[in-house]
Structures are given as C-alpha cells and as structure tokens.
Image (cartoon, grey):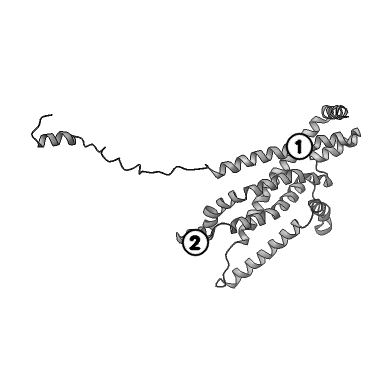
Amino acid sequence: MLEQLFSDIGIIWAKYGTVYLTGIWNTLVLATVSTLIGCVIGFVCGILQTIPCAKGDNLAKRFFLKLLRIVIRIYVEVFRGTPMILQAVFIYYGMPYFFGMAFRDIWTVSILVVSINTGAYMAESVRGGIMSIDAGQFEGAKAIGMNHFQTMLSVILPQTLRNILPQIGNNYIINVKDTSVMFIIGFQDFFAVHKMVSGAVFKYFPSAFLEMGGYLFLTLLASFLLRALEKRLQGKGNYELVSEDQLVMTAGTYQFSGAAPYEEKSRDYQGEKP
C-alpha cells in the first residue's frame, strides 16, 4: 500500500509539480505581506489604545480618545470573533450589496482580508506588550523631557517588539495555513492547487498527503527562522563586567619623558652612581 501511495505521489508531482510550487509561492507571498501589514495595523491600534488620558485633559481629547477606543474594540471583537472564510465572503461578495462596487483583483481582496484579521489579533498583543513594560520606563523617559510619541518610539516599542516577537511568529505560521480559506473566492494558493489536482487525477489522498507534507515543511522552516531571529534579538547569554577603568593607567606604569626612573633618582639622592 505504501508503495502504491508513493508511486501515486511521484506521478502527481511529475505532472503537476510546477503548479504545486506556484501555489506554495502564492501562499508564502500572501502570508508574508499580510502579516507585515497586520503588524502595522496592530501596532497602530495598540499604541492608540495606550495613549494616556487624564481627567485634567480637555474635553475634546477625552471624547476623541474614548470614541477611538470604542471603534478599535469593535474592530478587534468583530474580526476575532468571526471565521476568516466568512470575512472573505463578506468583503468579496458583499461589497456590491453595500457600496455598489466589487473587487476585481483576487490578490487585493486576499491581502486585505488576511491583513485585517491579523491586525485584530496583533492589536491585543501589542497592547498587552506595551502594558507589560515597567512603569519606570515611562517615568524615566518623561523625566528627561520626552513626550509620549518620543517615549513610545525610542523606549517602549523596541522592548515591546522583542517581547511579542513569538506572537508575531505564531501569527505568521497561522497565516501560512489559514490562507487556504482564500480558495473560497478563487485565490490560487497551495490548498487550491490540491483541490484542482485531486479533482483532475481522482487521487485525493496522495495529493492531500503531498499537501500536508508541504505545509509541515513551510511551518517548520518558519519556526526555525523565527527562533533564530528571537535568539539574536535576545543578545548574549552573559556579559563580562568591566573590573577596571580603561581610561586610567594601572598604578606604577606612569612614565614621564625626560625624567629618570624612581630607582635612579633614589640612588642619586643617596650619593650612589648607577
């Protein structure tokens, strides 16, 4: 049975290998671009939710920030609480009903759907990452005259990025797999190729076996690269503290040009000849 399975896989790959590789490429491009855009959306939403708002601030600022947080909360809850496949159907097929217009480019719709979905998850990750930074970091930045924007850009966000990097990697791996739902609107990703090939050769399981192996390879490779990046950002495991000031010369090594050594001077004082 295994010989027959691998024989069928070999036949399928020999005939449709190029098509599978095209599907893999489309999946990687969609997952990578959408994850990057989703991270930008998440960082913007996370930062806007953490803007300080005190009772002493003017009414317009407090009203605007309150309204902004309500809008972000609705966005996060809607896109986290509904399946991505239905979001794709709603945006692609629902636009003519609500706005009288339709998307013509499948790539645009696919990137839009996956990016917005990723941004909803990243918004909460970023907000939690910012809130996890010690309050002393904010106070120290404020003490040296930084405003909120400067504090976030130079002090808080670099630490937040390092803290939430595992979550970013997790979202990327999820997107590599979840792009498969875009076949519902006609996107030719890795999974859509499997549907097409299995229907053409009537060998569903060999194609599914090949598909599963391909997805596993992509996710393992992504995990390896992300762990390497995470380890690099963490820096060295230990650091050697400087035990002496490099700008100060060690005692007894001072030399002055034109002056005799200490021993020669002492012998001269005692009337001895060198």
x, y (%) of residue 220? 70, 38
Residue identified by numbered label 2: 139
Residue 173 at least partly seen: yes
Q: Nearer the viewer, residue 252 or 159?
A: 252
Quadrant of the image for the C terminus? top left
Q: Is residue 161 above or below residue 229?
A: below
Residue 15: image quadrant is: top right
Question: Regarding mark 1 in the picture, which secondary structure is present there?
Answer: helix
Going by the numbered disc 1, the residue's amino acid type is Ile
From mark 2 to mark 1, how far is it between C-alphas?
Answer: 48 Å
Residue at horizontal 71 percent and vertical 58 percent from the top: 76
Residue identified by numbered label 1: 24
Going by the numbered disc 2, the residue's amino acid type is Glu
x, y (%) of residue 72? 68, 61
x, y (%) of residue 154? 52, 53
Residue at horizontal 78 percent and vertical 51 percent from the top: 84
Q: Is residue 119 above or below residue 74?
A: above
Mark 2 and mark 1 lie on one chain; the one further toward the N terminus is: 1
Q: Nearer the viewer, residue 76 or 268?
A: 268
Instruction: Give the number of the disc on residue 37.
Output: none
Q: Residues within 10 Å of mark 2 (few under 14, many from 20)?
A: few
| Lateral position of residue 187 relative to residue 62, left or right | right
Quadrant of the image for the N terminus? top right
Q: Nearer the viewer, residue 29 or 214?
A: 214
In the rendered image, the residue lying farthest to the right is 202
Question: Regarding mark 2 in the picture, which secondary structure is present there?
Answer: helix
x, y (%) of residue 137? 51, 57
Q: Is residue 233 above or below residue 100?
A: above
